Image (cartoon, rainbow, N blue to C red):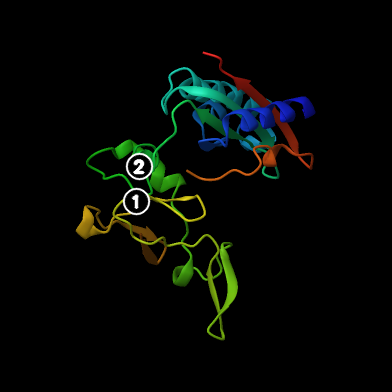
Amino acid sequence: MHERIQDARTYVRQYGRPDLFITFTCNPKWPEITEAILPGQKANQRHDITARVFRLKMGKVMALLTKQDIFGPVRCFMYSIKWQKRDLPHAHILLLLKEKIHPSRIYYFISAEIPAPDKDHHLRDIVTSHMVHGPCGSLNINSPCMNEVIRNGTRIKECSKNFPKEFLKDTQTGHDGYPLYRRRKSGDGGYTAEKTLGSGSCRGTFTVDNPTTHCSPGTGSKKLNNVGNSS
C-alpha cells in the first residue's frame, strides 16, 4: 500500500494534478446482486456477492475510462476501493489525461440538469432515482445536510451543500478551482421539472491537493491501484 501511494504521488509530481475525480459506488439493487442473495437477505449481508459483482463492474468502468477513452486518452490513473459503515464498496478514481479538459467542454461530460424525458428517458430515471439532492431547506428542515448558522444576527438552518445552486447559462470555473456547472433557467433553454415528495414537491476542473487523501491509513478496508500509460 505504501509503495503504491508513493507511485501515485510520483504521477502527480510528473504530470500535475488529476483532471477527473470519479466516484463509482456499489448499488445494492443491481440485479446481479438481488438475484443471487437469499430471500430476506440484504446486500450488505453477503460481502462475497457484492464484492464479486462490484469487481466485475469496476473492471468494465475502468475499460471504458482507460481503453475506450470516453474522456480522451489517459496518461495514467489511480483508484482506491473502500468498504465503509454501510458495508458496500465504492471506488475513488483519479484520471490524468493527455489533453486537459477546457471549461467549455465540461458540460459534455458532466451535467447538473435533469435530462429531458423526450430525449433520454432511461438516463432521466437514473438521475431522478439516485442523483437528486434533498428535499431540504423549507421542505425538510431536519434533513442531514442542514446546518445551523447565524445570518445578520439571526440563527437559521441552511443546506451545508449549498443547494439549490444558482442558475448559470454556461459552465464556468470558480475562483477555488471547482467548476460551476451549467444549470439553465427556462428562459435560457432549461425547463421546469416537478417531483412529488410525500405531501410536497421540489423544483428543482476541480483541485486535488493530495491524490491519496482517500488512501491514508484509517478504519475500514481499502485497496489502492495505480497505473501509468506509456503509450
Q: Amino acid at mark 2?
A: Tyr
Q: Quadrant of residue 59?
A: top right
Q: Quadrant of residue 218?
A: top right
Q: Amino acid at mark 1?
A: Arg
- Element on which disc 1 rests: loop
Q: Are marks 2 and 1 in contact (CB under 8 Å)?
A: yes
C-alpha gap between disc 2 and disc 1: 7 Å
Q: Position of residue 1 (x, y in %)?
A: 77, 28
- Element on which disc 2 rests: helix
In this rendering, the count of numbered labels is 2
| Direction from residue 64 to residue 143 in the image, left or right | right
Q: Residue at x 45, y 22 (%)?
A: 73
Q: Residue furthest top?
A: 231
| Label number found at residue 107 | 2
Q: Residue at x 26, y 45 (%)?
A: 116
Q: Circle 1: is it few (<14), some (14-19), or many (20+) Cα within 10 Å?
A: many
Q: Residue at x 56, y 24 (%)?
A: 76
User: Looking at the image, is 204 positioned above or below residue 97?
Assistant: below
Q: Position of residue 189 (x, y in %)?
A: 21, 52
User: Looking at the image, is 168 positioned above or below residue 8?
Assistant: below
| Direction from residue 37 to residue 216 in the image, left or right | right
| Label number found at residue 90 | none
Q: Is residue 8 visible?
A: yes
Q: Position of residue 67 (x, y in %)?
A: 47, 17
Q: Which comes sooner in the sequence, label 2 or label 1?
A: 2
Residue of label 1: 182
Depth check: give the residue in front, 231 or 56.
Answer: 231
Q: Circle 2: is it few (<14), some (14-19), or many (20+) Cα within 10 Å?
A: some
